[in-house]
Amino acid sequence: MYYGAEANPTATTQGTAVPFINTSYFNFGYGDINSGSHGGTSNERLIDAQYATSSIYVSTTMGGQSTMFGVNFADGRIKGYPANNLKKYYVQYVRGNIDYGKNSFADNGNGTITDNATGLMWMQNDNGAPILWKDALVYAEDFSYAGYSDWRLPDVKELQALIDYSRSPATTNSAAINPLFNCTKITNEAGVTDYPYYMSSTTFCSQTPSDGTDACYVSFGRAMGYMSVYGGWVDVHGAGAQRSDPKTGDPASFPTGFGPQGDAIRIYNYVRLVRNIGTSEVKNVESDNNLLTIYPVPVKDVCNISLNKKYNQIKVEIFNSLGTEIKKMEISDSFLLNINLVDLPSDIYIVNLTLDGRLTSRSIIKS
């Protein structure tokens, strides 16, 4: 459960703040305000209770700094922090299940993705436009797709579990998410092509648990901030950061962001819906995913499909995002398919493959 209330960044005592960790089971300490370990020129703040992780950002922040993702149990956020010897962090060691947190995605071929590791079904596409938090709740409540009407706005832990920390806009030219998912491209505050912040259903509380003016979001693109020392708008916390935005308001009221790193305040953010799946809906993702590999991602002129073995009879059907069949072919005795898509416009396509009578589906992005 996500629960807590951040401490006032300028406070010298805890006051009514509540740590974002269960202190009945785990020891917790706020920042040491008498320490200079927060940086070379500034003192530690009470709110500086960042815990280090082994996740290194594949890009950089703050104009080129090597960055580690850390969790701050004093303010409930996940951000990129300096991976250097200037800042000291708390650590919490763990042992055991090395597969914990690994997704097990299955493309259902109908615009939905099932994660058999979490028992959740996700929309493959986002909602396509930024909206307010209250409108996101209404959007989810009224949404019906693929025969299901129990779609909802994910909580922040569910949403953060979609982050793929091996990807970023700067290094893979993509959002920090498995390429099975489609993310709307945006132009960020620096005028650069980027990917959105996605809203969660989780309320963020500041200084007291009764405060509820903000909502948590997860950044699948650069986590932007305005810092004049780096020339203005830059990636300050990394693709994969978890921060918060006001639920209502005007983004124009924050022309240089908010807070010490000038966090971009967008207020209007994007939505990716989720639903819980029943036991009968769980697919054998392992055997299905091992059937084939599609490359490159995204597809340009030729879609290459490498099969796990040679099949005698192969039927290929390709549908556009409107569900119209636009290409069909039959191939015999092959394990490598090279499908010419040069005549097709940029779009998201569904490829149905029937391999010796077995049907499997994949989505592809044509750039």
Image (cartoon, helix red, strand yellow):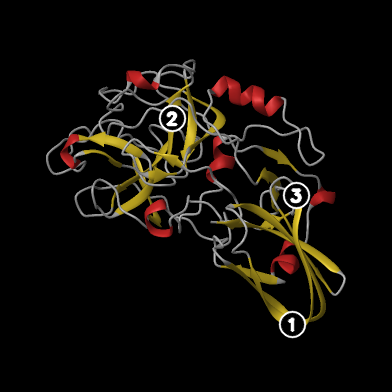
Give the answer, above or below, for where 191 lies relative to 260. Answer: below
Q: Residue at x 51, y 30 (%)?
A: 130
- Residue 231 in picture, x, y percent from top left: 19, 39
Q: CA distance from mark 2 to mark 3?
A: 32 Å
Mark 3, residue position: 110
Residue 191 in view of the camera:
yes
Q: Residue at x 48, y 43 (%)?
A: 185
Assess disc 2: are there few (<14), some (14-19) or many (≥20) residues with their C-alpha within 10 Å of its C-alpha: many
Q: CA distance from mark 2 to mark 1?
A: 51 Å
Q: Are marks 2 and 1 in contact (CB under 8 Å)?
A: no
Secondary structure at numbered mark 3: loop
Q: CA distance from mark 3 to mark 1?
A: 26 Å
Q: Earlier in the sequence, mark 2 or mark 3?
A: 3
192 left or right of 228 in image: right
Mark 2, residue position: 244
- Residue 311 in picture, x, y percent from top left: 79, 80
Which-is-in-front pick, marks 2 and 3? 3
Residue 230 placement: quadrant? top left
Secondary structure at numbered mark 1: strand
151 left or right of 280 in image: left
Closer to the camera, 3 or 355? 355
Q: Amino acid at mark 3?
A: Asn
Q: Amino acid at mark 2?
A: Ser
Assess disc 1: are there few (<14), some (14-19) or many (≥20) residues with their C-alpha within 10 Å of its C-alpha: some
Mark 1, residue position: 334
- Residue 200 in picture, x, y percent from top left: 55, 32
78 left or right of 346 in image: left
Residue 32 placement: quadrant? top left
Q: Earlier in the sequence, mark 2 or mark 1?
A: 2
Give the answer, above or below, for where 49 lies relative to 136. Answer: below
- Residue 245 in picture, x, y percent from top left: 43, 26
Q: Amino acid at mark 1?
A: Ser
